[in-house]
Amino acid sequence: MNRLLSWPGAKFRQMDTIVALLDRDRYRVIVEPFFGTGAFTWRFGGRETGAVFAGEKSPHLRAWWMNLMQDPEGMVEMMAQARTRYEAAGRDRAVFDALRGAYNEAV
């Protein structure tokens, strides 16, 4: 799955186990109290569902999702620019330090 957002604690790896426990034909409302990256909601995004109720404690994730809903094109552009700017962060310490510094300034 191509993820829109990566975050520590995401449920992507556990999703098959979670889904196996559900009777997907019985439930039509999604409740995801620890929304994070929305892994559970995205998994069922292609299915017809009712309402989606999501909660997230992290102010950073809440802000990210709110910005995405209000200005999707702007967020896609901003994420593409950040990905290009910091793509070497996993192999170049200076790029990693710049990424961490930018995050710390934003917080």
Image (cartoon, rainbow, N blue to C red):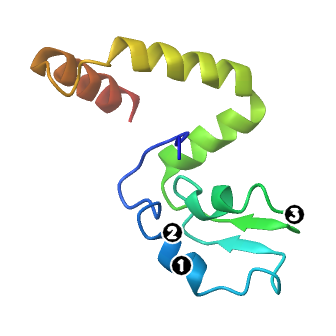
In the picture of the structure, the residue carrying the numbered disc 1 is 18
Tell me the kind of residue under disc 2.
Met
- Asked whether, in this view, residue 48 is left or right of residue 54, the answer is right
Disc 3 packing (10 Å; few <14; some 14–19; many ≥20): few
Q: Residues at badges 3 and 2 in contact (C-beta under 8 Å)?
A: no
- Image location (x, y in percent) of residue 89: 23, 23
Real-space Cα distance between discs 3 and 2? 18 Å
Tell me the kind of residue under disc 3.
Glu
Q: Is residue 42 above or below residue 75?
A: below
Identify the residue at horizontal 64%, vertical 60% (top origin): 43
Residue 69 - label: none
Q: Earlier in the sequence, mark 3 or mark 2?
A: 2
Identify the residue at horizontal 53%, vertical 52% (top origin): 37
Q: Is residue 31 above or below residue 41?
A: below
- Asked whether, in this view, residue 6 is left or right of residue 46, the answer is left
Disc 1 packing (10 Å; few <14; some 14–19; many ≥20): few
Is the C terminus in the top left, top right, bottom left or bottom right quadrant? top left
View extreme (left): residue: 93
Residue 15 - label: 2
Q: Secondary structure at mark 1?
A: helix
Disc 2 packing (10 Å; few <14; some 14–19; many ≥20): few
- Asked whether, in this view, residue 13 is left or right of residue 45, the answer is left
In the picture of the structure, the residue carrying the numbered disc 3 is 48
Tell me the kind of residue under disc 1.
Ile
Q: Secondary structure at mark 3?
A: loop
